[in-house]
Amino acid sequence: MTEALQGPQREHWLRAIHSELRSLLTKGTWRMLDRNQAHNRPLTVKWVFKVKKNEDGNLDRFKARLVVRGFEQQFGFDYNQTFASVAKAATWRILLTVAACLDWEIEQMDVSTAFLEGDLEEEVFIEMPEGLVEYFDQHPEDRPPGFSTEKICKLIKSLYGLKQAPRQWQKKLKEALESLDFRQATSDTAVYHNPTTGVIIITYVDDFLIMGSNKEAIQEYKARLGEIFTMTDLGPASHFLGVRITRDRNSRLIYLSQDAYFTRILKKFGLEDCRPVKTPMERNSLSTLQPRDNGDSASPEEREDYSSKTGSLMYGMTQTRPDLAFLLSVLSRYMSNPSPAHSRLIKRGLRYLQQTRDHGLVLGGVKKDPESAWSITAWADSDWKGDTVTGRSTFGWLVQLEGSTVSWRAKRHETVALSTTEAEYTALSQCARELAWTRNLFSELLLPLYMPIPLNGDNQGSLKLCRNPELHQRTKHIPLTEHHIREEVEAGNIDVQYVSTYEQVADGLTKPLNTVSHGHFLEAIRVSACPIEEAGRIIWSTEVHDDSVP
């Protein structure tokens, strides 16, 4: 705090501090007590300062936040349960696809000081915040009777930094939404659905997406929530969790892209002018990825650089870029001790990002009737012994809703598969779990599905094993949990179908592809260049001047 108030931005930070204190006092966040009234040791607090930027990277405002040093808390004394959920990326991709096909309204709101809304269940005490005395000197009307600098604060409301703060906010939000007749989904507890109006609310901490066909109901819920919490109405959704949302309502399309984020990370790693490449990996690159020799370790700087680059790419992959999934599956295996070959590979991944930073997911494009059922198709594949170091295989699966890719995964097997049949069977079983979850989500949100769901594989032996317990001598060692898929097939939930290797969409999740095959893969998973929206007009990158690109 001293450093901030002695710098050239002193007045900006001082106003930010006073704004935060005013908000805390208005909400009744604490009550002043004598020190001897504390039942637990008071926790210390600190100020965290941040220059907030908008989605385009421009200065928005100066933000000061009072944060409890939560690491001082003791379990069973000043906190107990801490779990709080956030919306799964697959959930909001699914619902954005539904919204695109049905031409629903999609509105966005966020909650100001969300963590201050939660009511505490434990007794938590904090030391008096630095700057509070000076605030009272300038605003004596806010000074409580009997105020003394020797006082401490007993928290009534939650505060940033507390271990239980996210959980308490989520409980408060659940109470508020249930009072408006919303039901919390079990398959994703960050999603709420009103069965009467059909409105769905997706929550991610303090960010909300509100969608449905009933405009009047959406506006009413926004107004009601604004009466309960301090909300900012952001209008039609344009950015969510750093993902740009661009709509072409005439074509029932939604584009999800992260061009601004990718531009930032390329600049961060000094690669904004690097030479682009057309594939994330070279076709034969796996054979070159040998670990370091025994006793040879990467330096702390090398590990930090590798982890930072991998993590940056990982976020993009999990949100909008399934074409990066296999690359990240490989890179993440060597986080603790990357070799120069691994560092070269991640640099190539960033060069691929340079080539495709305007790429993202294309959702929708199908005009649906509100009463019609939804079509899901899944694909699962595996290589065999593709990891030249461990001999393990890598499986990959993806799920498409009306042709739009909504969930995916690429992962190395936990154990060595003894045959291609076993490797492919494991891939199918892993995908079946995702399909069970997807089916539950649709059921809870009262969205009908065409059943059974087609699950495509390219290995006849594994497909036979899904239908019947054949090949006993060669498959008797497979873990019982993998046979979950057989129950799903018998129940009529999944129909396993054969496709040729050339038709297998998930092929690009299990191995590097050449340029031509990778292009077909991008087309099949609907990852392509995405436009942006300006003043209600869809603009493609060829129409945008270089200096206007974020």
Image (cartoon, rainbow, N blue to C red):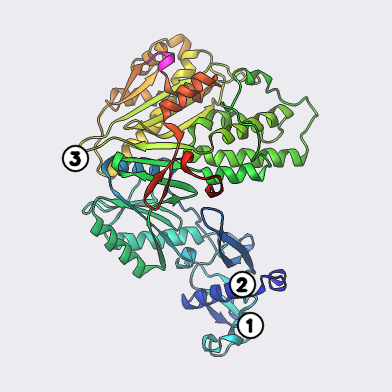
Residue sitting at x 56%, y 23%: 415
Which residue reaches farthest right? 295
* Residue 531 in which image quadrant: top left
For disc 2, the marked residue is: 12
The main secondary structure of the magenta stretch is helix
Q: Earlier in the sequence, mark 1 or mark 3?
A: 1
User: Horizontally, is 346 left or right of 89 in the view?
Assistant: right
Disc marking residue 134: 1
* Residue 96 in which image quadrant: top left
Q: Amino acid at mark 2?
A: His
Residue sitting at x 72%, y 39%: 303
Q: Amino acid at mark 1?
A: Glu
Where is residue 429 drawn, in percent x and y? 42, 25
Where is residue 248 drawn, in percent x and y? 34, 43
Q: Earlier in the sequence, mark 2 or mark 3?
A: 2
The N terminus sits in image quarter: bottom right
The residues tagged by marks 1 and 3 sit, at their Cα atoms, a distance apart of 62 Å
User: Horizontally, is 217 left or right of 335 in the view?
Assistant: left
Q: Amino acid at mark 3?
A: Glu
Q: Earlier in the sequence, mark 1 or mark 2?
A: 2
Front-lying residue, 171 or 47: 47
The residues tagged by marks 1 and 2 sit, at their Cα atoms, a distance apart of 16 Å
Residue 501 is one of the magenta-drawn residues: yes
Q: Assess disc 3: are there few (<14), some (14-19) or many (≥20) residues with their C-alpha within 10 Å of its C-alpha.
A: few
For disc 3, the marked residue is: 371
Which residues are drawn in magenta? 499-503
Q: Secondary structure at mark 2?
A: helix
Image height check: is 109 above or below 490? Answer: below
